[in-house]
Image (cartoon, rainbow, N blue to C red):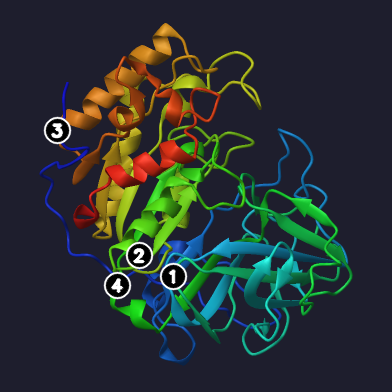
Amino acid sequence: MTIKSPLRRAGVALLTTATLAALPVAGPEALAARPAAAAAADHGAGSGGASWRGGWAASPQQPTAPFGPNWSQQGFSDHTVRQVVRVSTGGTRARIELSNRYGSTPLRITGATVAKTAGGGAVRPGSVRQLTFGHGRSLTIPAGGTAHSDGVPFPVDALESVTVTLYLAGPTGPTTFHHFAGATAYRAVGDHRSDVSGTAFTETSTSWYYLTGVEVSGGRDSRRRDAVVTFGDSITDGVGSTPDADNRYPDQLAERFVEAGRPRSVLNHGIGGNQVTNDWSWAGEKAVARFRKDVLSEPGVGTVILLEGINDIGGSMPGAVGGPTPEVSVNQLIEGHRTLIRQAHARGIKVIGSTLTPIKGSFYDTPDNEARRDAFNAWVRTSGAYDAVVDFDSTVSDPQDRDRILPAYDSGDHIHPGDAGYRAMAAALDLDEL
């Protein structure tokens, strides 16, 4: 089937976009865990009446190490952790979001700072700002809880990198984290939250720990409060892109908005290995369960892009990391997407559906898996279930073999795009449709 434009209208009536709300910090010492939906009424308002916008986000996961050591299972004790993220939209104030969603005990944050990134583990002199939580320097987040810092004056531009530093004095136990960061985190022994130099940060990791959001308010970009959330698996997460280069497709979409002169919040809620219908021990809760927590808890979401399902198709294969998951039919995958669409539309959020990208030559390549991928993609293109459709399959496939990623777009494993492939995906999206 030929589609002239990668993104087309699908004829589903939109609901009025609802303003979603953020979870405020209850106090410096104890916080009650609250579900995302219950926080909706006060999400948009921050300290001083500020209206917060998502600058950067990552979905939390339970501690796991399926591909080699990281810091999630052991956790921290008298450690400072420094993490660098790039915001998609700018502002004059900032605050951070921390998650203990998968912690088994309360999490004590002794102190935290935010600063302008200088490169590696270093920050720009004079840019370090101490963060507070309910006007205190420290806080305790209960098991299962999420908290925001107070807002702090912190002018930042769209596409600027900021460094968030956490000091964890006592033992944390296993850590809520995000596995495939595609970015370097830095660790030092002792309290180095205010260090300008990165000298003390002698250990590194490629995951994010506790940090699940950076939000901004004020500034020229405040006119746009309708965030775009990209939701999916490793292809949304950016696996296969160059580390520390911010070349995931959501990053490059944010760059397109800036180049067009209309910076906009673009938030990445992809999890490598994630499935729509099955929980997977190393790859997060199934999408139909985590959508409410990860997407509907973000401030001011206007649009969500759904790209997920290839792990439902391939995850039942023998030898799958973490063990095979139950086999998923095309009809079950379709019903999972319909569930996500209903959840989004109930909040007035526009839904862009995406076709699943090629798998020929990859570890998921079997005739049955390819048949299911083709059948699901046919439904995405023709069902009218979404508000619009982007044909990422056609975008990155080889014109000579539509079941295979174009070699120039292939990261090398024949399933994940590289930087050029992710750039093509971002270019396939019509900014006026989002």
Closer-to-camera residue (144/362): 362
Which tag is nearer the camera, tag 4 or tag 2?
A: 2
Task: Answer with the quarter of the image where residue 125 lies.
Answer: bottom right
Work out which quarter of the rendered image holds the N terminus and state it: top left
- How far apart marks 3 and 1 lie (CA) works out to 32 Å
Residue depicted at 64% across the width and 36% down the height: 282
Q: Are marks 2 and 1 in contact (CB under 8 Å)?
A: yes
Task: Answer with the quarter of the image where residue 221 lies.
Answer: bottom left
- How far apart marks 1 and 4 lie (CA) works out to 12 Å
Which tag is nearer the camera, tag 4 or tag 3?
A: 3
Q: Can you give x and y, in whole percent of width and height, for residue 333 in the image?
A: 35, 28
Closer-to-camera residue (73/336): 73
Which element is circle 3 on? loop
Residue to which mark 3 is pinned: 4
The residue under label 4 is which amino acid type?
Arg
Residue to which mark 1 is pinned: 158
Mark closest to the chain's N terminus, 1 or 4: 1
